[in-house]
């Protein structure tokens, strides 16, 4: 009953007109980012953090969460209509989604995808509601050593984000940690790697680094002629699925929700893995598996449900344990920290009202996306008709605004440009960017909690072996690090090709 | 029966990869040297230089490991598709000029000129379209942020521009 009361309280706050507006704007912007080529969810969420700077903490996170799951809806549109995934998790939808477009059934594919995303997203949020209280109660048992162990679990996930080479992933992780160490040391107060510049005493702006690494470097690495497309938006009438479509989609919705939610809970698994495995499940279990690849509705319903269930399910480790399960969630975690909220067990102890408001808004956001996406499909496709150079100019302008407004300093714009060039070099060298984001966010937390722990124990490292929660968490981290040896990793095909890593 | 030792051919490492490895090693070495001066350990545990020291050493070792992996052709970085150099130059230079000019000419003028460069000169968009988009992107975004979102954007420091509220 406690949970229900708190959730109802959350709905009361989330349904104020301001928070509804933030969720609405977030859904709109998220869909646009998902639709746009050349700007992924990581850079998109980071880029829009400045929009939320002057909002209260709840409003700001509501908007950023809406942007986050809006991108998964938006990515579907280009997969179905253009044979080009707007974002990685929708890549597998191309197979049947685009085949349905060629059969003149694009509208049905988009409606089923939106319905599946709604079902998957809502059920995964219900899972968050159920998990929040028991895991949140851990907050009372969390001190610096436990927090350190939690952060170590988070950082160990870079093993799962390795892509083609573990060595290059570790290099990326080390670079993220080094960048996070620029500025005043959190315990002794000594300046580190500031090169005598006062502006670096507060460290390097997280937003400027992420926008540069992911957004600017993506634009710099773009080659002309890749994105010339012709797109036809389906009419309103063609959007309605038949009774058979619904009947055939229902088992796929159920399987997609189970797979997406389950994998979303496992840090390091990306939405692409969920949608791919969901497609695999349809190939194995669907009655119409022979039609898959030729425009079967199950090939859209399953993966699209799975990737949204994954996106919402992945918020559970963030909210309850403070572990970012993917690069985009790491950016979201950065936004939490900028608002003075530390995601994890202490969130429900210290900011329960805000946490429940955000959770309630996730339900509302899923409804908004369902209402927005299907009727507005014509608008989304019209965005794709804007020539790429025009989009580039506007995106660059928003990057400048995003980098500037974090500290109201032109210095951060230069930082963004520098990291754009560094990002281009890292892409060229095939060094994955995802581990860098993870360690950039978690690095300062890890260092602070380790040094506070050793402060308590007067330098005695055995403090980490004397507390049961810490020991369990460190063993979990060890298991994650050793998982490549046990082959507990994502499918081999995705390890190399997953664009999210 | 004679045993024949087969020598695995040493892969040729791309120049750009070698340069990347050299830069990473140099960064690692610099961090290692700097962190020693910050203090590695004290009575209360690790000092400010402890973490950077480990990371600097790790970066040097990982760069070396990567070099040997590339030579052996293990998990080697695939040749990257060349990016459009003129695009890279144009974007980076225009951003640098904009960032340097913002404190003097302000957001509205700076972004207007920046967008006109990208829309009219680079994308060859028509004059009218370029002007409309550049005005919306500069003046429109300025007022959206300053009035709508209460987030201030840079204003011109140069006298004639600042006098007319740009």
Image (cartoon, rainbow, N blue to C red):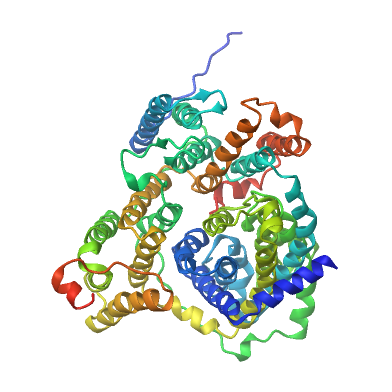
Question: Is residue A17 placed above or below A30 in the rendered structure?
Answer: below
Q: Can the viewer see residue A300? A: no
User: Within the image, what quadrant is residue B29 found in?
Assistant: top left
Residue A486 to residue A406: above or below: above
Relative side of A79 to B161, left or right = right
Q: Residue at x 21, y 62 (%)?
A: B101
Q: In the displayed orientation, state which residue is furthest to the top.
A: B1
Residue visible at 65% across and 81% down? A108
Q: In the image shown, does A183 or B4 lie closer to the viewer? A: A183
Q: Quadrant of the N terminus of chain A?
A: bottom right
Query: Which residue is depicted at the point 25% across and 60% down?
Result: B94
Residue A220 in sight in this render: yes
**Lateral position of residue A484 relative to residue A440, left or right:** right
How many numbered callouts? 0
User: Looking at the picture, how far across and down is residue B92, in whole percent?
Assistant: 28, 56
Q: Residue furthest bottom?
A: A237
């Amino acid at each position: 009953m406690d949970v229900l009361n708190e959730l109802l309280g959350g709905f009361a706050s989330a349904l104020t007109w301001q928070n509804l507006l933030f969720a609405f704007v977030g859904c709109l912007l998220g869909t646009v980012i998902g639709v746009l080529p050349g700007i992924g969810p990581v850079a998109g969420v980071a880029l829009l953090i400045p929009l939320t700077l002057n909002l209260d903490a709840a409003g700001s996170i509501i908007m950023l969460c809406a942007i986050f799951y809006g991108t998964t809806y938006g990515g579907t549109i280009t997969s179905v209509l253009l044979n080009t995934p707007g974002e990685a998790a929708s890549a597998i939808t191309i197979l049947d989604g685009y085949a349905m477009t060629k059969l003149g059934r694009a509208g049905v594919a988009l409606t089923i995808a939106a319905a599946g995303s709604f079902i998957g997203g809502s059920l995964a949020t219900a899972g968050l509601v159920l998990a929040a209280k028991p895991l949140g109660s851990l907050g009372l048992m969390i001190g610096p050593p436990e927090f350190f162990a939690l952060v170590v679990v988070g950082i160990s996930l870079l093993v799962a984000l390795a892509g083609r080479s573990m060595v290059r992933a570790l290099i990326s992780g080390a670079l993220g940690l080094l960048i996070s160490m620029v500025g005043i040391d959190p315990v002794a107060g000594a300046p580190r790697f500031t090169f005598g510049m006062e502006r670096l005493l507060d460290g390097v702006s997280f937003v400027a680094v992420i926008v540069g690494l992911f957004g600017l470097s993506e634009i710099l690495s773009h080659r002309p002629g890749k994105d010339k497309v012709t797109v036809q938006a389906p009419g309103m009438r063609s959007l309605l699925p038949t009774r058979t479509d619904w009947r055939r989609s229902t088992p796929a919705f159920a399987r997609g929700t189970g797979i997406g939610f389950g994998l979303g809970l496992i840090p390091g698994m990306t939405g692409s893995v969920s949608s791919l495995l969901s497609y695999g499940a349809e190939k194995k279990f669907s009655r119409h598996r022979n039609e898959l690849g030729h425009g079967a509705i199950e090939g859209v319903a399953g993966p699209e449900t799975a990737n949204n269930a994954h996106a919402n399910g992945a918020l559970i480790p963030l909210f309850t344990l403070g572990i970012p399960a993917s690069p985009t969630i790491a950016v979201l975690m950065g936004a939490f920290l900028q608002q003075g909220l530390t995601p994890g067990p202490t969130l429900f102890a210290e900011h329960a009202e805000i946490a429940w408001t955000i959770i309630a808004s996730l339900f509302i956001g899923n409804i908004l996306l369902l209402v927005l996406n299907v009727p507005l499909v014509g608008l989304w496709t019209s965005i794709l008709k804007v020539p790429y150079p025009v989009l580039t100019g506007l995106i660059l302008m928003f990057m400048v605004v995003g980098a500037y407004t974090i500290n109201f300093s032109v210095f951060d714009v230069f930082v963004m440009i520098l990291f754009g060039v560094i990002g281009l070099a890292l892409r060229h060298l095939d060094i994955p960017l995802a581990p860098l984001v993870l360690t950039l966010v978690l690095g300062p937390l890890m260092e602070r909690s380790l040094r506070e722990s050793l402060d308590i124990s007067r330098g005695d490292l055995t403090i980490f072996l004397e507390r049961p929660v810490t020991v369990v968490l460190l063993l979990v981290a060890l298991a994650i690090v050793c998982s490549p040896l046990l082959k507990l990793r994502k499918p081999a095909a995705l390890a190399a090709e997953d664009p999210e890593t | 029966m004679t045993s024949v030792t087969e020598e695995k051919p040493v892969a040729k490492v791309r120049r750009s990869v070698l340069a990347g490895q050299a830069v990473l090693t140099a960064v690692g070495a610099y961090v290692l040297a700097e962190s020693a001066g910050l203090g590695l350990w004290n009575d209360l545990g690790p000092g400010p230089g402890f973490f950077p020291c480990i990371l600097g050493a790790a970066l040097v070792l990982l760069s070396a490991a990567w070099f040997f992996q590339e030579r052996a052709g293990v998990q080697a970085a695939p040749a990257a598709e060349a990016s459009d150099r003129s695009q890279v130059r144009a974007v980076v230079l225009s951003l640098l000029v904009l960032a340097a000019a913002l404190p003097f000419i302000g957001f509205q003028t700076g972004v207007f000129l920046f967008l006109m460069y990208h829309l009219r000169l680079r994308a060859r968009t028509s004059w009218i379209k370029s002007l409309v988009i550049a005005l919306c992107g500069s003046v429109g975004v300025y007022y959206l942020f300053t009035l709508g979102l209460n987030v201030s954007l840079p204003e011109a420091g140069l006298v004639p521009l600042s006098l007319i509220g740009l």
